[in-house]
Amino acid sequence: MIIDGKKFAKSLRSKIKFEIIKIKKNKKPIPSLTVVLVGSYTPSAIYVKNKELSAKEVGINSSVLRFESSISELKLISVIKKLNQNPKVHGILVQLPLPKHINSNTIIETIDPLKDVDGFHAMNVGNLSIGKDSLVPCTPLGCYLLLKSIKKKLVGMNALIIGRSNLNGKPMTQLLLKEDCTVTIAHSKSKDLKNLCKKADIVIAAVGRAQLVKGSWIKKGAIVIDVGINRIDFNGKSKIVGDVDFESTKKKAYAITPVPGGVGPMTIACLLNNTLKAYKNINS
Ligand code: NAP
């Protein structure tokens, strides 16, 4: 089975849109998201544009605050503090990476955890790890929702997460532990990745190495979620591929996400979902 992330994301966006229509009908304040973009790094500008358009499409009020890359850390902190205090702002997202002279952790920790729609604030990270309700980082949340759409009960399954980043691997670990999976986390120093893969009922690849995971490594009937986005040269043309060799793996797996069209579309849909969740939490 090829897991259609585009379709799933579309249906999630429709649900969010429907909820926002109800909010508007009841003449309540409209959920709003503010994205802070520093500098002119092209991929960041593209991501931010996509986030803005998707937010508008579902009826979320979205705005982008743009700053020169020379902005000081102190100034950026004061911008975020103002957004924290603004009752009309429900979600705050600071697009990463930030210029080198700004400490990303300091900036993330300045965001009000209730408005931290990226789920990176230590309070949200901690709440997720102790099993409390929290805002969960968008990409692992998207992977989790896709996984649950394939299999409702994951109890006792052996899950291998390849990659231990704060953005993907670590939150994914918490989500799967909560589902009573037996979780193994692999990273660049792990030995014999092939063997670890062979034992896994679920493989989540969040590495950033093109087609690292081969079909011959996959246990028959496993579920494979590919987070990776890698640009490679293919017959003289540029092509996007995942961390999993899709062609050989789809023959062995029970279900697999393609790249593109798998996890990617879920990330922005989950950001909108987090914005709506933050809005509800703030208003309750
Ligand atoms: P990251 O911060 O660079 O982390 C990569 C992880 O992979 C690290 O833990 C690293 O180990 C591990 N690793 C590297 N080489 C390895 C190897 N040969 N074997 C096993 N583990 C290895 O990356 P990230 O931010 O998590 O992103 C991972 C991928 O997901 C990238 O391709 C990125 O573009 C993609 N991504 C996709 C989305 C989406 O919406 N689909 C969103 C975010 C990211 P160490 O910890 O030991 O260094």
Image (cartoon, rainbow, N blue to C red):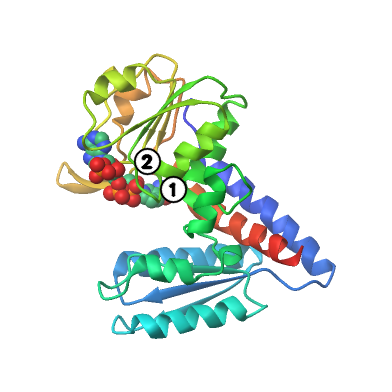
The residue that mark 1 highlights is 264
Q: Which mark is residue 259?
A: 2
Dot 2: element:
loop
Answer above or below: position of 207 versus 135: above
Q: Which quadrant does the C terminus fall into? A: bottom right
- Dot 2, crowdedness within 10 Å: few (<14), some or many (≥20)? many
Residue contact between numbered discs 2 and 1, judged by CB atoms under 8 Å: yes
Can residue 208 be seen from the camera position used here?
A: no
Q: In front: 253, or 29?
A: 29
The kind of residue tagged 1 is: Gly
Answer above or below: position of 156 versus 232: above
x and y, in percent, of residue 65 in the image? 47, 80
In what quadrant does ligand 1 lie?
A: top left
Answer above or below: position of 177 versus 87: above
Q: Residue furthest left?
A: 236
Horizontal side, residue 152 vs residue 123: left or right:
right
In the image, is the residue at mark 1 within 8 Å of ligand 1 by its beta carbon? yes
x and y, in percent, of residue 247 in the image? 31, 27
x and y, in percent, of residue 137 in the image? 49, 52
Residue at x-position 44% and y-position 66%: 108
Mark 2 → mark 1, Cα distance in angstroms: 8 Å
x and y, in percent, of residue 105 in the image? 38, 65
Can residue 45 be seen from the camera position used here?
A: yes
For marks 2 and 1 on the same chain, the one whose residue lies earlier in the sequence: 2
Dot 1: element:
helix
Residue at x-position 75% and y-position 73%: 29
Q: Which mark is residue 130?
A: none
In the image, is the residue at mark 2 within 8 Å of ligand 1 by its beta carbon? yes
